[in-house]
Amino acid sequence: MVEQRPPGIQDTMMNMLGLIENLLPTCSCGRPQKISLICQDEQCKKRQLQTYYCLDCAQTQHKHSISNIATYFEEYEKKWDILASILDIAKQNLDEWNSKMKELIDLVITKIQGTPNHLLQQREEFPELLKIFLKENEKKAKAKMENNFDQYVCILLKIDDFQRTFDSLDLIKNGLSDITLNYAFKQILLNIEQEEMLSLTEISSLYEIMKLQLNNRLESLLGEVACPGIQSLETFSADIDRINGCILANIRNFDLERALLLRFDMLDYKWKFEKFALEKRLKEREEELGRMKELWALEVRYRCIFLSRFGLGGHFKNV
Ligand SMILES: [Zn+2]
Ligand SMILES: [Zn+2]
């Protein structure tokens, strides 16, 4: 029986080189040898002139430790793959956030009137980055397929720039959340009047503004007293009851007038929030009822027509 030797590093490297053999040009030294190494030694005088070289040149020109070009390319390809999946996730998050916050963002845009805003800028820059990234990724694959070494390498190395650009979009990179919203639009949302917030159509938009305004006032009132603010849309009313109880229990620690005013406003917001939610539910039900009425009227009309013309009832399948 022939003993099978496990593949060594040398074998793996040769196999990897074999996979990209057609892509690799012959060495600039003039010998009929393909390049297989890359110079990564910053001290090497040949580095600029002959970045990629053959095994012969390794012995005569680049007398330093060697780096296999296939491994080097592999590492860069991996960087492309990793960034591609990160960008994909970031896109899904941004899309989700955009649709959830659409009404609020539109409102902020009208308020901001062109003043540069970190979040809005990144929200526009990200899709642009993604578009270019995907285009270059395609061009890279094409260059590899067509064995266009220079173009392939040129695009392959762009990944570091793409990574840097994405890193600079810190808000998108770190994941958009309520915290991002508060951070980016705080002052604008704090200044929105009740009448305006109540004219919005989405309960989630109303919630975000009310939460920010009330939590902001609560924080400035609390001082040493610990009391978590409003936590979620689903617990909005219960949170307000809890906070109001907490303020009351610690009332001696606060400026009385401010504390009572906040308690009043908390209740006022709670009542308006619940009214908003109820009106929305009733409107939906009304619409549903309207749809059913119209459908029923249509059916009755056709039953009458069939009955008068053919003596048939409402069984349209018999017609
Ligand atoms: Zn050479
Ligand atoms: Zn070198």
Image (cartoon, rainbow, N blue to C red):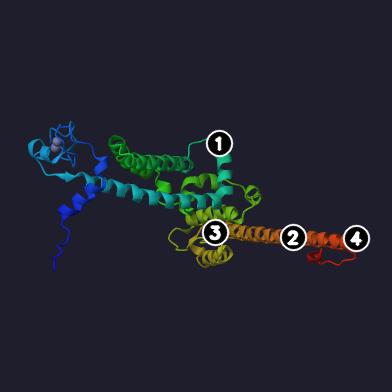
Mark 3–mark 1 distance (CA, rounded to whole Å):
35 Å
Residue 147 occupies quadrant: top left
Mark 2 or mark 4: which is in front? 4
SS assignment at label 4? helix
- Does the CB distance between marks 1 and 2 fall below 8 Å? no
Q: According to the image, label 1 marks what residue?
A: 113
Name which of mark 4 and mark 3 comes first in the sequence.
3
Calculate the distance from the C-alpha at mark 4 to the C-alpha at mark 3. Answer: 75 Å
The residue at which mark 2 appears reads as 286
Q: Which residue is mark 4?
A: 309
Secondary structure, mark 2, is helix
- Mark 3 lies on a secondary structure that is helix
Using the image, determine if residue 136 lies above or below residue 210: above
SS class, disc 1: loop
* Ligand 1 occupies quarter: top left
Nearer to us of marks 1 and 2 is 2
Sooner in the amino-acid sequence: mark 3 or mark 2: 3
Side (left or right) of 225 relative to 245: left
| Amino acid tagged 4 | Arg
Rounded to the nearest whole Å, what is the CA distance between mark 2 and mark 4?
35 Å
User: Does ligand 1 reach within 8 Å of label 4's beta carbon?
Assistant: no
Q: Badge 3: how crowded within 10 Å, few (<14), some, or many (20+)?
A: many
Give the image location of residue 171, x and y in percent.
Answer: 42, 47
Going from N to C along the chain, the mark reached first, 2 or 4, is 2
Between disc 3 and disc 1, the foreground one is: 1
Image spot of residue 143 (x, y percent): 34, 39
Q: Which amino acid does the dot numbered 3 rest on? A: Ala
Q: Residue at x 55, y 47 (%)?
A: 189
Q: Earlier in the sequence, mark 3 or mark 1?
A: 1
For mark 3, what is the residue? 259
- Name which residue lies at 77% across and 59% down: 290
Q: Earlier in the sequence, mark 1 or mark 2?
A: 1
